[in-house]
Amino acid sequence: MQIFLKGLYQMSMPVAGVGYPSSRPTTHYYGDRFIPLRGGRNMEIAEALLNIPTKDESTAELSPSRAAYRKLLADTMLQGRTRVLCFSNPPRTPLKSSLEPPTPTNIQPVAKKRRHIPQGPKQTLDVPNIIADDQLNVLDWGSEDVLAIALDDAVYLWNDANESITELVTVTGSSAPITSISWAPDGRHLATGQSDATVVLYDVTAMKPVRVIT
């Protein structure tokens, strides 16, 4: 670093005859910041040290304890193999750990229960005055196994448990006909859409409306 700074200082000095008078001759010194100065080094000694042959451990004589250690290490790690990676021999069977649970042999596969699908209708309902329009939703099955169906201006409930039919509501005037019905997830509330853009929410347990949305 000192040589490099000295070189920069010598290069920055003014040259005689170019506008600056000088009483001594100009010295040009070009330093290099990447190649070190080897003037004070003995290259012959460095070359001799690099060419000294190293001692090979494989040809050197080992002590009996070190030879026994190397043999024990090779037997443990290689397990009698000559190479660590051997692609010609099949893999060795791993030893079973004593902590692994025993494999059960008396477990029989569980037969899957087959679902019975009826081939005929369970119940046939008569639906007079139903509006045959695929843009309407006049039929919906609730989570409590109750079927709600809108027949023109009336809504009927059919209970699958006791096969009973109950009339929920009948609308008149501009509210008729009922254009859509939908059960709530709890199976106890039913929403109906009427022709006058009114939505009525019914409590089917109390058989009365609980909310009107216009």
Image (cartoon, helix red, strand yellow):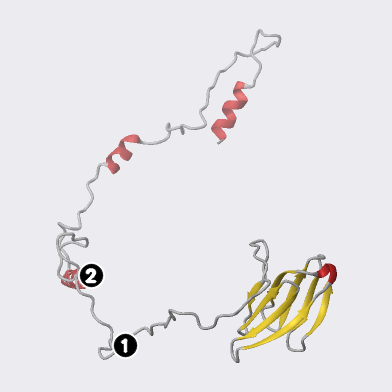
Task: Locate the C terminus and report the quarter of the image it occupies.
Answer: bottom right
Q: Earlier in the sequence, mark 1 or mark 2?
A: 2
Tell which of 75 and 65 is nearer to you: 75
The residue at the point 15 percent across, 62 percent down is: 61
Task: Check disc 1 and report the residue beneath it.
Answer: 101
Q: Amino acid at mark 2?
A: Met
Which of the 4 image quadrants contains residue 77?
A: bottom left
Q: Position of residue 148 (x, y in %)?
A: 66, 78
* Front in this rendered view, residue 34 or 42: 34
Q: Is the C-beta separation of discs 1 and 2 under 8 Å?
A: no
Q: Is residue 110 visible?
A: yes
Left or right of residue 154: residue 106: left
Determine the secondary structure under disc 1. loop
User: Mark 2 sits on what residue?
Assistant: 77
Q: Position of residue 19 (x, y in %)?
A: 71, 9
The x and y percentages for residue 145 are: 60, 84
